Image (cartoon, coloured by chain):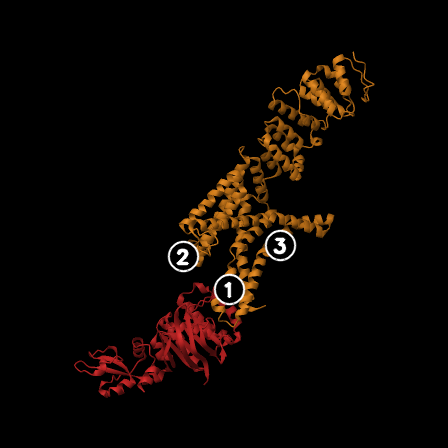
Amino acid sequence: MGKVIEVKNLGKSFGAKQVLKNISFSVEEGSFCALLGENGAGKSTILKILMGSETLDRGEVSIFDFDVFKSPSKLRENIGYVSENIHFELPLSAMEVVDHYKEFYPQFDMKLFTRIARERHFDLNKHFNDYSRGQKMQFTLMLALSINAKIILVDEVTSVLDIYARKYFMTLLHQFVKMGGTVVLTTNIIAEVQNYATHLVMLKDGKVHINAVIRDIPKFFVKIRKVPGKEHDIFSDRECYWAGENTDGSNSYIIPTYLKARYELSDEWTDRRGVQLDDIFIYFFNVSSETLEDKNEQAA
Amino acid sequence: MNKLLRLFFTLHFKAMAKNLGLSLILTLGIMVIMGTSVEKFPLILSGLFFAFNTLFNETRKFFGDNLSWMIIAPISKKKILLYQFVTASLALILTYIAPAIVFIACFIPLYFEKIRNFALDSGVSQAVMRKIILAFSEFSFIPSSVIAFTLTFIFFHFIACIVFGKSKMQPSAFLLNTQTKKGKMLFLALIFANIILIQFFSASILYVTTMIIFLVSFNTLINLKRDLVLSRVTDRHILGIPVVLSLAFFGSLKIYSDHQLSSPKTSMIAKLQEIEFQMKFSDYLDEKRVVEFLHSGLQYKEYSVLTEVYEEWPELKNSLNSKKDLVFTKLIQSQKDPRVLTQILTIFDAKNLNVMDVEQFLSQYNKVHKGAQSLPILALQHLSQVKMGRSDLMNYLVSADPLKQMLAVSFAKNTELNLGPEIVKSINNFNDRTLEQAKAVLSLSLCRSISTVEVMNAHKAEKYSLKNDCKFTKERLPASK
């Protein structure tokens, strides 16, 4: 499987604020990549740059080996983009919007669209602007899924959807990936990443902190448990972070794997439940701006 | 055609259809309220359609509003820019062309019979062209009002920027924002200023004001419904409000205009403007009423304006003459100033007048100019062309009324009547004042049949000698006493 998206040394500033600093990552064909990060971390900006609707200050961004700013517009026939900022300000019914929209995408699958609309109980005779915020998101997701794209970029829309719609569309996106499609999803919902994503890119302070396959990520961390009455020096280490209190009164902590080796920690301290993505998320939002790669290098 | 252009034009035509529907409702309302004839239907419909297309052209924002999905669609950005330019230009052209097409489409069936008849006489192309040019000259009235409205707003917006500071005015607010307190104040000031202007001018300005009220209320309601995020049904109901409002304004406009026309205090210029305004829209106002409105209680100083009217508007004079039997008595009897009375008389072609009309005039003249011993030369010249019988004139000569005597004298030039001998016979009955005027009349009257000197000598010598052919010369005169 080749790389379908490649971002190299991407830098972007808005005024004096540098949002993205030297961002590099790639997404392979047939993968479900989750871009995780705090609000304002630059996730949506990356997707906009990938769509060519936002400029970059430096670096290179390519899709299917085409520079997004030099690529033919026809390339966008293969990319679906879903964002809260997409508006169809047309005095037309949703069905009429679809009729016009599909003309821009020769491979538009009308059958799939009507099937999803039926399953989601969509009234296509309504005007787009009469839909609720969540319905608008669903509508744009339906369009993106129906254009027979090779890549679908989803910008944080799943947080707007209700639990049923979210599950429904995440399943559809998952099926899309299984059929060889590629999805890049920006989100704050860890469960989505955990259940559906195959690849994680975590952003903090304009940098990529994690760029790894989801199943490999737990290998970099260890979850340990502090039972009341027992003490260990590792708990006072600045890289050891509290990850929550347990029902038996013990507290869980998360540490990078190399720290366990440094303190020669025995298995009795290990929390058997294993490392979850939300633990890692907490860890990264507490640590300094050093990336995991920096830390691993330092540890080595 | 390109997909994007097709979508744009679909939307544009849809918006135009909406505007046309709205214009149609308004036009029908105006026709009922103002009593406009079916012939004026194309004019008003296309005018309103033009106004709506100009001011409520939502498709102008098409590219700006829909850029979010267009920019991610497989369309090159250069093409989007190009299409934006092309569509903006075409939209503008369509805004002007569409009302003209609507106008012609409505106009041709209505006038088909007339055009056909006209074409038989003067050739099809010439006839159609003439009609169209005529129609378009009328058609310019409503757009010009819209332009006046727009210019007024630009002016007031400019003033508002100076008064309140540019930063406080929305840069995009081309029209005054009537939702703010200051905007409302300015709007009221605008209406007030127009009302003051109306006092000096006419309902044409009231018409422009009405348009402003209508359009602003329409615009405000559109903004309001957006802010309130109303349902579509409520949306449609709300759009009905400005339509009802504007119809109510047109109704009040008609009442106001009628009041202005019939009021004796209204100046001639204002009356003319009212007539011009009403003639554009209303067919209740026929020529007979126009004449009544124009001439009732006419002041002498205003007569020069009326003279200009007839010069500019010969059709009115012709129409007036064709309806002489209906309007003459009323017009003559309505005059209070002998000078104006004389002027009014001259509007009517002397060939159309008869003895009764002359009597009517003389009676009114006596009434408004008590103790009058003579008639103005203008009246005499005009009346001397009236077709009158010899017996009537002879009666006039022997009557005690100096006006009638003078009138009979003025017929001296008419060789067919051969009044010369009778005038000379009656001259001794004339009082001094009448005699003096008779002298003047005969000097000026192009009288080929009688000499002034002869009359005077006859009067003084109580001797006269006239020949039936009345071709007197000095040599033929009898020796004075």
Q: Secondary structure at mark 3?
A: helix
Q: Which mark is residue B105?
A: 3
Give the residue drawn at x 62%, y 27%.
Answer: B339
Q: Which mark is residue B63?
A: 1
Front label number (1 vs 2): 1
- Rounded to the nearest angstrom, the CA distance separating label 3 from label 1 is 31 Å
In the rendered image, the vertical position of residue B186 relative to residue A163, given as above or below = above
Protein chain holding label 2: B
From the top left corner, tell me how far across and down residue A235 is, in percent: 22, 81
Q: Are marks 3 and 1 in contact (CB under 8 Å)?
A: no
Disc 2 residue type? Leu
From the top left corner, tell me how far across and down residue B475 is, in percent: 83, 19
In this picture, residue A238 sits left or right of residue B259: left
Tell me which numbered mark, 3 or 1, is placed earlier along the sequence.
1
Disc 1 residue type? Phe
Q: Which chain is orange?
A: B
Whether residue A190 appears in this view of the structure is yes
Q: Which mark is residue B228?
A: 2
Q: Which chain is red?
A: A
In this picture, residue B436 sits left or right of residue B202: right
Protein chain holding label 1: B
- Rounded to the nearest angstrom, the CA distance separating label 3 from label 2 is 39 Å
Q: Are marks 3 and 2 in contact (CB under 8 Å)?
A: no
Tell me which numbered mark, 1 or 2, is placed earlier along the sequence.
1
The quadrant of the image that shows the N terminus of chain A is: bottom left
Question: B436 or B277, which lies in front?
Answer: B436
Q: Are marks 1 and 2 in contact (CB under 8 Å)?
A: no
